[in-house]
Amino acid sequence: SAKAAGRNTYQFFTPEMNARVFERLSLENSLRKALPRQELMLYYQPQYRVGGGDPIGFEALLRWRHPELGLVPPARFIPIAEETNLILPIGEWVLAEACRQQMAWQRAGQPATTVAVNLSPVQFRQRNLVSLVQRVLAETGLPAAQLELEITESLLMDDTERAVEVLHELKSLGIRLSLDDFGTGYSSLSYLKRFPLDKIKIDQSFVRDMIKDSGDAAIIQAIIAIAAKLELGVIAEGVENQSQLDYLALHQCGEVQGYLFSPPVPAAEVCRFFNSATRAPAPMA
Ligand code: C2E
Ligand code: MG
Ligand code: MG
Ligand code: MG
């Protein structure tokens, strides 16, 4: 009983808590084996100019095919990978695999596009990040200008001085940098001019409600205006329907990504985006 166990000790471990701790531990254990067992894979989501045409880039998104649990979404395992530092080998694999895949497509005749890779703040704190990126580019042969790294605002907050330095070193390799989930973090506007960014990604939460929520619509217009003034590119994430696309076109958003065009798909399916019989949706006006 709780009493026998002493004050404030065992009674906190309810059966549900035990189950949760067990689940977390077993997920962590199987995540350790995921890379060597080749259970990780990348899906790719196309990115378009607002006017339509062929994809101009792809975002690589990590998937875990767990032998018993099936497809585990990144929201469930990336936090564990970050807490355990497993994100370092996993992130290195993601980077190399995305660059290798992009070059394989090109060698097979697919037009050259960018490939965007999400970078965890944990990877960013890694000392050898810049040389890792440099090595992957050299080993895969991907031109640096075709690699885009997606970073988040939290990473810029941590150690601002060092962040500025590392981002400049990355930029000097010739790669592109984009700021993911913009508007959801601390969103200090001064970041936009202090850091050597190429593009802002408007978070999907604003896009989702912009047609019925005038506040979200105003935020989107403001982000687009600031990006234009600072000569940054701007892409809206999570575009799901035609009215969102029309609104973004009306307000001169540059690029779009979302289920309206396609969900993320396995690498083998990417060739169909370049088939002229399946044109991407374009704005009405
Ligand atoms: P993110 O980088 O902001 O990626 C966008 C997420 O929105 C993806 O979820 C994508 O599948 C989803 N999405 C795309 N279009 C739509 C849409 O029209 N509507 C809706 N509702 N969702 C859409 P996903 O693949 O589950 O990834 C979730 C997050 O996990 C990513 O957010 C990113 O933060 C993280 N993540 C994914 N892959 C990696 C990776 O390789 N490394 C790291 N560090 N993080 C990753
Ligand atoms: Mg992203
Ligand atoms: Mg995002
Ligand atoms: Mg996100």
Image (cartoon, rainbow, N blue to C red):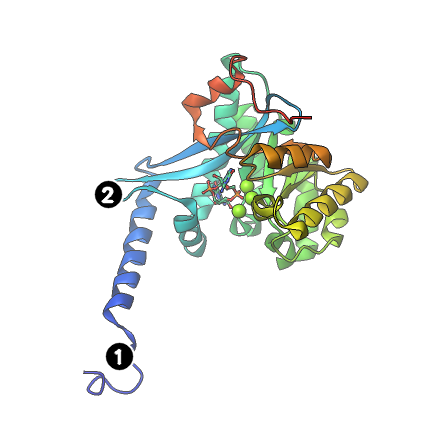
Above-or-below relation of 92 to 79: above
Q: In which quarter of the image is residue 119?
A: top right
Q: How far apart are marks 1 and 2 (CA)?
A: 32 Å
- Residue 47, percent from left and from top: 58, 30
Could you tell me which secondary element the residue under label 1 belongs to?
A: helix
Q: In this view, does 41 lie to the left or right of 177?
A: left
Instruction: Please state, as top left, top right, bottom left or bottom right, where the N terminus lies in the image.
Output: bottom left
Q: Nearer the viewer, residue 98 or 201?
A: 201
Q: Earlier in the sequence, mark 1 or mark 2?
A: 1
Q: Position of residue 277 (x, y in %)?
A: 52, 12
Q: In this view, does 238 lie to the left or right of 4?
A: right
Q: Position of residue 51 (x, y in %)?
A: 67, 24
Q: Residue 11 carries which label?
A: 1
Counting the numbered discs, the total is 2
Quarter of the image where one finds residue 48: top right
Q: Does the residue labelled 1 lie within 8 Å of ligand 1?
A: no
Q: Which residue is drawn at 47% across and 18% down?
A: 272
Q: Observer-nearest residue: 211 or 204? A: 211
- Is 222 rendered above or below residue 61? below
Q: Which residue is drawn at 72% across and 34% down?
A: 250
Disc 2: CA contacts within 10 A as few (<14), some (14-19) or many (>=20): few
Mark 2 lies on residue = 68
Task: Give residue 250's mark.
Answer: none
For the residue marked with disc 2, what is the amino acid?
Answer: Glu
* Residue 1 appears in the rendering: yes
Residue 272 placement, left or right of 186? left
Q: Residue 68 falls in which quadrant of the image? A: top left
